[in-house]
């Protein structure tokens, strides 16, 4: 494929990448708002995940990361959400999200999700064995004994010692890291093609965090599943991601292979995020900050949503910038990109 | 690891054990449980106990004070008060348990629907609940019992219906709490159907407060049954009931005080028992202290 063909394809689907590995999930132009709001909380978001790929969605709280994931899973409350556009291509099915949700028989089966808070994500009334077996029974049928065997196998896979005994334990008897492992075991019990992990390590301490990331990476290698990981921790992204989508105010502002985005960030917001990360190699200096705060969704500016906080903003930014390919699948939604050639001021 | 699991006190204890342990160390709860167990036992054993027929009259022993032949004395037509007390316990406990059973069976599903689905089902159920709650419990029960006609069965139905709104309210509130829990989202994320989510994820987690409320409501229902029987709307003569015994006894308070004393004491004790039991359960099941 030539560069121009690549760009044409990227422009058509609105997502980056040339697709060396088989694409598993594609989300096209998702826009949605909650009832009573005047602007979209997720605006024109497109994502694409291939087999074995780990895509990280980063952005600060309230930027629409989790809502996007919930919309993909079909978990948003129907009566409180208005989806104005969006198509999901997954597992041979095309779902028009305006009218339908991801069919329930795919949830927990072909596509699985783990949540941020392992302490509250398990049902306190049943043993963990019961809960993992429940997922297996729901999608694979068979006997309870078989399902429990599968649960045991999964617990072993996620590194829980003496899984037979653990099956009979209740969530409150496990630590946070253990519970997150159980959540992962439950999510992966039916060999999903896609795992959506909504800040899976935020509630865990650093050593456990590293273990869980290792686990996800290992399982990805083993099963070839695609992963969408939502996080606000750039360290996590650097450690685990193949590609990254940076979201701000409900829009994807920069997207591409992690090396490109991290080494050569092109959107002013991404640059701001990068320079706000404390560094071990140049300690002592003050951390850069992104000035101001995210406007509330009703107060979002027209056009580029970052322009009220951006050092490079010009009147032209009142027009919404499209995600343009800078080459190699590195997409940026900024009128001034690439910054080296278009901007001469210093931030 | 196996050894660690076996010896680690945290891992070894199960929630059931902890609840039971907490309950056992709760003295008044154990007293309440004992009282309730005692009354249940004598009510169940009524047919096999060596006591006279509670409806058999003896004109030679009218309004006799307690003695060796009649441990609790006799009533105005010579019936053995002890025997009537024991058979009356059956009526009282049955009324308490059955009417609360009706209230729970009707109230909990309605509360689940209202709380989980929201929208118009919630609006309809909640407005009806409020309408029922606007009438005082006993007045509503009396009105319903009078409307249905006097009998123990109808009294139980009337009390059950009157107690239903409490359970709808309680369940709905609990469901609203539980349904925003992450584990409910994760149940939906694994593709469980609504029916399963309600029965396996919501119901078990709203049960503890409902159990406590049910125990406390049994006490209220026993008083209500006694009140209805006292008014002639419950158990019909000659079948014994503590309420109807009190009704007759009120005419002979100065001549035969024991006729009123025993049913009064029994109602007091059984109601006290259920209240202590309910309080104990509440403490034992309180998740905040886990």
Image (tube, rainbow, N blue to C red):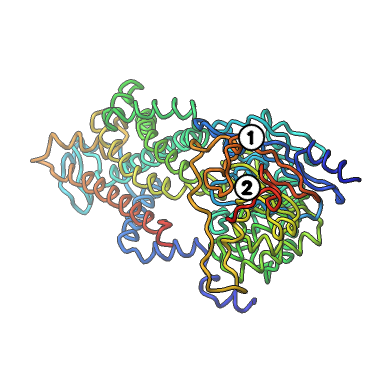
Viewer-proximal residue, A77 or A337? A337
Q: Secondary structure at mark 2?
A: strand
Q: Is residue A281 left or right of B169 when viewed as pictured?
A: right
Q: Which mark is residue A247?
A: 2
Hey, which quadrant is residue B56 in on the image? top left
Q: Which residue is mark 1?
A: A31
Residue positioned 85% across, 48% down in the render: A19
**Given this view, does label 1 or label 2 mark the residue nearer the observer?**
2
- Label 1 marks a residue whose chain is A
Badge 1 and badge 2 both on one subunit:
yes
Which residue reaches farthest right? A1
| Image coordinates for residue A161, horizontal then vertical, percent | 68, 71
Q: Earlier in the sequence, mark 1 or mark 2?
A: 1
Q: Is residue A141 among the parts visible in the rendering?
A: no
Disc 1 crowd, CA 10 A, few/some/many (<14, 14-19, 20+): many
Above or below, comparing residue B136 to residue A341 in the picture? above
Report the front residue among B162 and B8.
B8
Q: CA distance from mark 1 to mark 2?
A: 13 Å
């Amino acid at each position: 494929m030539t560069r121009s063909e690549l760009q044409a394809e990227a422009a058509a689907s609105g997502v980056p990448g040339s697709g060396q590995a088989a694409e598993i999930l594609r989300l096209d132009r998702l826009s949605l708002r909650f009832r009573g709001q005047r602007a979209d909380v997720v605006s024109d978001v497109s994502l694409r995940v291939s087999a074995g790929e780990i895509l990280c969605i980063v952005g600060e709280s309230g930027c629409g990361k989790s809502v996007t994931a919930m919309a993909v899973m079909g978990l948003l409350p129907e009566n409180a959400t208005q989806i104005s556009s969006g198509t999901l291509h997954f597992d041979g099915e095309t779902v028009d999200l305006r009218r339908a949700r991801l069919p329930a028989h795919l949830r927990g089966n072909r596509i699985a999700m783990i949540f941020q808070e392992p302490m509250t994500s398990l049902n306190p009334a049943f043993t963990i064995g019961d809960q993992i077996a429940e997922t297996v029974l729901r999608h694979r049928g068979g006997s309870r004994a078989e399902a429990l065997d599968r649960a045991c196998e999964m617990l072993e896979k996620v590194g829980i010692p003496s899984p037979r005994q653990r099956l009979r334990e209740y969530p409150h008897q496990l630590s946070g890291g253990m519970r997150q492992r159980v959540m992962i075991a439950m999510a992966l019990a039916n060999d999903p093609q896609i795992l959506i992990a909504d800040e899976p390590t935020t509630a865990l301490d650093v050593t456990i965090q590293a273990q869980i990331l290792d686990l996800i990476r290992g399982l990805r290698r083993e099963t070839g599943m695609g992963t969408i990981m939502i996080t606000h921790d750039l360290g996590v992204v650097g450690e685990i991601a193949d590609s990254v989508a940076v979201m701000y105010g409900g829009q994807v502002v920069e997207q591409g292979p992690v090396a490109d985005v991290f080494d050569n960030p092109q959107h002013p917001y991404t640059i701001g995020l990068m320079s706000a990360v404390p560094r071990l190699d140049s300690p002592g200096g003050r951390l850069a900050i992104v000035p101001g705060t995210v406007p509330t969704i009703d107060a979002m500016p027209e056009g580029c949503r970052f322009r009220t906080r951006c050092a490079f903003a010009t009147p032209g930014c009142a027009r919404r910038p499209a995600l343009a390919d800078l080459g190699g699948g590195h997409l940026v939604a900024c009128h001034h990109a690439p910054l080296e050639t278009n901007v001469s001021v210093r931030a | 690891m196996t050894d660690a699991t076996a010896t680690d006190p945290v891992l070894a204890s199960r929630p059931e054990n902890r609840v039971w342990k907490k309950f056992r160390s709760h003295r008044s709860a154990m007293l309440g449980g004992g009282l309730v167990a005692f009354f249940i036992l004598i009510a169940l054993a009524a047919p096999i106990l060596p006591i006279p027929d509670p409806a058999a009259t003896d004109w030679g022993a009218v309004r006799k004070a307690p003695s060796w032949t009649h441990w609790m004395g006799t009533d105005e037509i010579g019936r053995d008060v002890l025997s009537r007390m024991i058979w009356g316990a059956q009526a009282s406990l049955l009324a308490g348990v059955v009417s609360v059973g009706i209230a729970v069976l009707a109230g909990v599903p309605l509360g689940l629907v209202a709380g989980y689905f929201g929208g118009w089902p919630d609006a309809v159920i909640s407005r009806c609940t409020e309408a029922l709650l606007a009438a005082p419990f006993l007045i509503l029960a009396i009105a319903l019992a009078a409307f249905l006609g006097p009998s123990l069965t109808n009294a139980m139905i009337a009390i059950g219906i009157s107690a239903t709104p409490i359970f709808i309210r309680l369940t709905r509130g609990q469901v609203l709490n539980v349904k925003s829990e992450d584990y409910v989202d994760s149940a939906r994320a694994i593709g469980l159907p609504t029916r399963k989510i309600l029965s396996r994820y919501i119901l078990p987690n709203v049960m503890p407060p409902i159990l406590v409320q049910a125990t406390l409501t049994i006490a209220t229902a026993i008083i209500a049954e006694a009140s209805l029987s006292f008014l002639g709307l419950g158990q019909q003569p000659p079948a014994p009931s503590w309420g109807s015994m009190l009704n007759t006894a009120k005419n002979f308070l100065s001549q035969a005080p024991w006729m009123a004393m025993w049913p009064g004491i029994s109602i007091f004790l059984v109601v006290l028992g259920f209240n202590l039991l309910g309080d104990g359960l509440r403490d034992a099941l309180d998740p905040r202290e886990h």
